[in-house]
Image (cartoon, grey):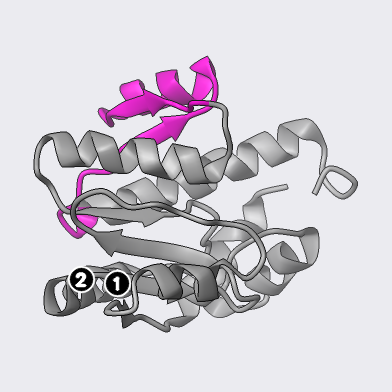
Amino acid sequence: MAGDLSEDARSTLGQALAERTADLAVDVGLIPVLVAGDAEVADWALLHGLPSIPDPGEGLDRAAEDGVLWADMSASPWIVLHADLPLLTASELEAVESTRLDHGWAIAPSADGGTTALAGSGPAVFTYGPGSFRRHLGRFPEAGIVIRTGLLHDVDSYSDLAAARRVPRGGWLAGLT
């Protein structure tokens, strides 16, 4: 979105998305752990009472694996959930957790074939990027699939953001950028 939004606007949007996603997780009884790529994000997490771990700087797959290792140290189940889901609701997040409980694993695709949420327990190897839903499903064939509007619509481009603003539940985005 660098060509469409200023650096400040992207930062504001990213923080608002992360805060909203973390708040939804807390609302449904989960403990969000942020994988923080810089000190500002880690400070923001600390200010909001959220644990964070440093981003290993080796891409999304490794960041997700480190988050899972953090959860696994306490023998906790986990959900890797991306913060760029402006239409996500608490009931959709509960559906991911419920599906994980029923199947052991849960996976949610994005509309473009990516993966917006993956839940399980124990170690996992991730393979994000274009077409990741199919690859993740190949790694976790027993996973229950969760298809919900708020999980399908991630924000990878300015047109994704504009589309989210046109949906009633995306109205909260109007004041941003």
Number of the label disc, if any, that sits on residue 116 = none
| Amino acid type, label 2 | Arg
Locate residue 146, reporting x and y percent.
36, 80
Choose between 75 and 176: the one closer to the eye: 75
At numbered mark 1, what does the secondary structure look like: helix, strand or loop?
strand
Answer left or right for 83 relative to 94: right
| Amino acid type, label 1 | Ala
Q: How many marks?
A: 2
Number of the label disc, if any, that sits on residue 100 = 2
Residue at x 44%, y 74% (from the top left corner): 138
Locate residue 154, reporting x and y percent.
59, 65
Whether 134 is drawn above or below 79: the answer is below
Residue at x 64%, y 61% (from the top left corner): 155
How far apart marks 1 and 2 lie (CA) works out to 5 Å
Q: Quadrant of residue 114?
A: bottom right
Choose between 108 and 135: the one closer to the eye: 135
Identify the magenta region.
Answer: 27-56
Choose between 99 and 66: the one closer to the eye: 66
At numbered mark 2, what does the secondary structure look like: helix, strand or loop?
helix
* Outermost left residue: 75
Answer left or right for 145 relative to 129: left
Answer left or right for 92 relative to 100: right
- The answer to whether marks 1 and 2 mark residues whose Cβ atoms lie closer than 8 Å is yes
Residue at x 84%, y 43% (from the top left corner): 2
Locate residue 96, reporting x and y percent.
28, 71
In the picture of the structure, the residue carrying the numbered disc 1 is: 106
Give the mark nearest the N terminus, 1 or 2. Answer: 2
